Image (tube, rainbow, N blue to C red):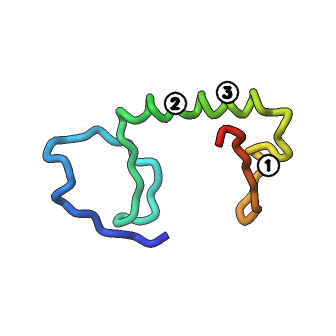
Amino acid sequence: MEIQHISTDLLTRGRLETTIIRVESPLLFWVQLKNGKQDLKELEEELNFRISSRAKYLYIWPDQMRVDRDVAVRDRQS
């Protein structure tokens, strides 16, 4: 992953509540906006619903996926 600088002109001038979700070093860390937790929860619920409704078509379950393993997905909607 290449680290990119951000323009401070795009930052909010007010305070935002965040949660630190991962720390690599004092200069490299990930945060999540606290108001985004509900959006994430809703996304997880929808993904779980879609996976459970399509379970009979799965050849590999999401928890069986591993790094460097190819996975193909076909969506019949397109």
Front residue (pair 5, 26) = 5
Alpha carbon distance from label 3 to label 2: 12 Å
Circle 1 Cα neighbour tier, 10 Å, few/some/many (<14 / 14–19 / ≥20):
few
**Residue type pointed to by label 3:** Phe
- For image coordinates 79% across by 43% down, the residue present is 61
53 relative to 12, above or below:
above
- For image coordinates 47% across by 53% down, the residue present is 22
Q: Which badge, 3 or 2, is on the more N-terminal residue?
A: 2
User: Label 1 belongs to which residue?
Assistant: 64
Q: Which badge, 2 or 1, is on the more N-terminal residue?
A: 2
**Residue type pointed to by label 2:** Lys
Q: Position of residue 69 (x, y in %)?
A: 76, 62
The answer to whether residue 27 is left or right of residue 64 is: left
**Residue type pointed to by label 1:** Gln
47 relative to 12, above or below:
above
Q: How many numbered callouts? A: 3
User: Label 3 belongs to which residue?
Assistant: 49
Secondary-structure class at tag 3: helix
Q: Position of residue 49 (x, y in %)?
A: 67, 27
Q: Nearer the viewer, mark 3 or mark 2?
A: 3
Q: Position of residue 19 (x, y in %)?
A: 38, 42
- Quarter of the image for residue 29 reads bottom left
Q: Are marks 2 and 1 in contact (CB under 8 Å)?
A: no
User: Label 2 belongs to which residue?
Assistant: 41
Front residue (pair 46, 27) = 46
Where's the C terminus, which quadrant?
top right
- For image coordinates 75% across by 27% down, the residue present is 53
41 relative to 13, above or below:
above
Q: Are marks 1 and 3 in contact (CB under 8 Å)?
A: no
Q: Position of residue 12 (x, y in %)?
A: 18, 47
- For image coordinates 29% across by 38% down, the residue present is 17
